[in-house]
Image: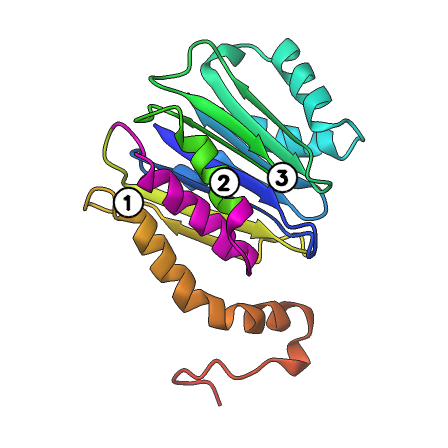
Amino acid sequence: MTFSLIAVCPTTKRVGTVVTSSSICVASRCSFVAAGVGAAQSQNITDPDLGPQMLTMAQSGLSPKELMAKIVADTPNIQWRQLGLVNLDGKTAVFTGDESLGIHATAEGINCAAMGNMLQSTAIPQAMVSAFEQTQGEFAERLLAALEAGLAAGGEAGPIHSAGMKVADKANWPVIDLRVDWEDKPDQAISKLRDTWNVYHPQMQAYITRAVDPAESESYGVPGDP
């Protein structure tokens, strides 16, 4: 009931993930990023512990495929999981357990990987990878283009109600963490996520400056702010 893409920008070294689902609050339990490390997805019958575990293991020097093999070998109930990881070097690994739901598929590309379950077709992850690779410009725009391409290629078997985008840069906190936790109108969560990004994008750098160099912060421009 989820499709997603994880990626790294080789120029800025930002890492990020986009995800959408028919289930509520999908990004809150499936998407994980760590600055200077990578991005991970844990989905299908989701175990949120596996996202941070993959990112912690990535810091040990294991390649994504090495650590994925270790997780698959050592983790109980792994056949109910669908996992993905991209590291800072753009290396990827994906796994889909035998108990994954409905039509499911994965695709790996240049600095990115996509995966999904309960899909309309197995072509959707590759459509997402192709969109990410072919879109130019801002990293977040490339992530959103991938999510939109997944929907255009057929999306989920059921209606989509939630979506999210998470990106880490240099700080320990994500510079982008946008979520549509529930949208009643079917298949509108992705467009609502883009609308939120369009509002947030012009303000993003100001919020980063407030964290790292508050003396240079610009005014909030709201009542009560001198």
The residue that disc 2 covers is 130
Where residue 151 appears, x then y in whole percent?
Answer: 33, 40
Q: Is residue 176 magenta?
A: no
Disc 2/disc 1 C-alpha distance (Å):
27 Å
Where residue 25 appears, x then y in whole percent?
Answer: 36, 40
- Which of disc 3 and disc 2 is earlier in sequence? 3
Classify residue 191 as left or right of residue 58: left
Magenta segment: 133-157
Classify residue 46 as left or right of residue 73: left
Callout 2 touching callout 3 (CB < 8 Å): no
* Kind of residue sitting beneath label 3: Ile
Where residue 131 appears, x then y in whole percent?
Answer: 47, 45
Disc 1/disc 3 C-alpha distance (Å):
31 Å
Q: Which residue occupies 45% across, 14% down?
A: 80
The residue that disc 1 covers is 182
Residue 85, numbered label:
none
The residue that disc 3 covers is 110
Quadrant in the picture for residue 110: top right
Asked whether the viewer can see residue 131, the reply is yes
Asked whether the viewer can see residue 46, the reply is no
- In the rendered image, the vertical position of residue 223 relative to residue 133, given as above or below: below
Looking at the picture, the colour scheme in use is rainbow
Disc 1 residue crowd, few under 14, some 14–19, many 20+, Cα 10 Å: some
Disc 3 residue crowd, few under 14, some 14–19, many 20+, Cα 10 Å: some
* Kind of residue sitting beneath label 2: Ser
Q: Is residue 147 magenta?
A: yes
Disc 2/disc 3 C-alpha distance (Å):
9 Å
Q: Nearer the viewer, residue 201 or 71?
A: 201
- Foreground mark, 2 or 1, reads 2
- Which of disc 3 and disc 1 is earlier in sequence? 3
